[in-house]
Image (spheres, rainbow, N blue to C red):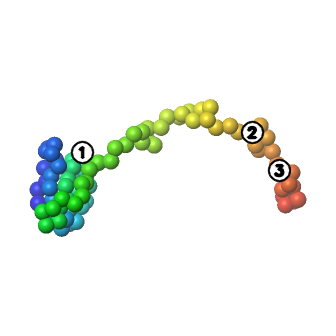
Amino acid sequence: MKISATEEKPTRIGAFAAKTELSKLLRQTRAGKRFIITQRGVPVAELRPIERTAPDSQRKRGDMKGKIWVAEDFCEPIEEMREYMG
């Protein structure tokens, strides 16, 4: 089965074909293609790319500045733990 990635309108595909071609469909979906999955010619689902806002890979260094606070005594020993620390 040849699946073209140039169409804008979702391509209809049967459930059995979608199951056997899932890896190929996912690659094309990642590239922006949409599919309508049918059972006996009746549309039952849509396979489409998810909308991503800001992927974690695009986070910038320092973007949490001012949102995290660390106490001055953060690295100091805890008095209640002294007896366990020898």
Tell me the kind of residue under disc 3. Answer: Ile
Q: Are marks 3 and 1 in contact (CB under 8 Å)?
A: no
Residue 21 shows up from this direction: no
Residue 7 location in percent, x, y?
Answer: 13, 44
The answer to the question of whether label 3 and label 2 lie on touching residues, with beta carbons closer than 8 A, is: no
Query: Which circle marks residue 2 in the picture?
Result: none
Q: Gap between marks 2 and 1, in whole Å?
A: 47 Å
Q: Which of the numbered marks, if any, corresponds to residue 78?
A: 3
Of labels 3 and 1, the one closer to you: 1
Mark 1 neighbour class, 10 Å CA radius: few under 14, some 14 to 19, many 20 or more? some
Identity of the residue drawn at 62% across and 32% down: 66
Front-lying residue, 19 or 82: 19
Q: Residues within 10 Å of mark 2 (few under 14, many from 20)?
A: few
Q: Which mark is residue 32?
A: 1
The answer to which of marks 2 and 1 sits earlier in the sequence is 1
Q: Position of residue 79 (x, y in %)?
A: 86, 51
- Position of 3 with respect to 28 (left or right) is left
Q: Earlier in the sequence, mark 3 or mark 2?
A: 2
Which x, y percent locates residue 54? 42, 39
Name the side, left or right, on which 54 lies relative to 34.
Answer: right
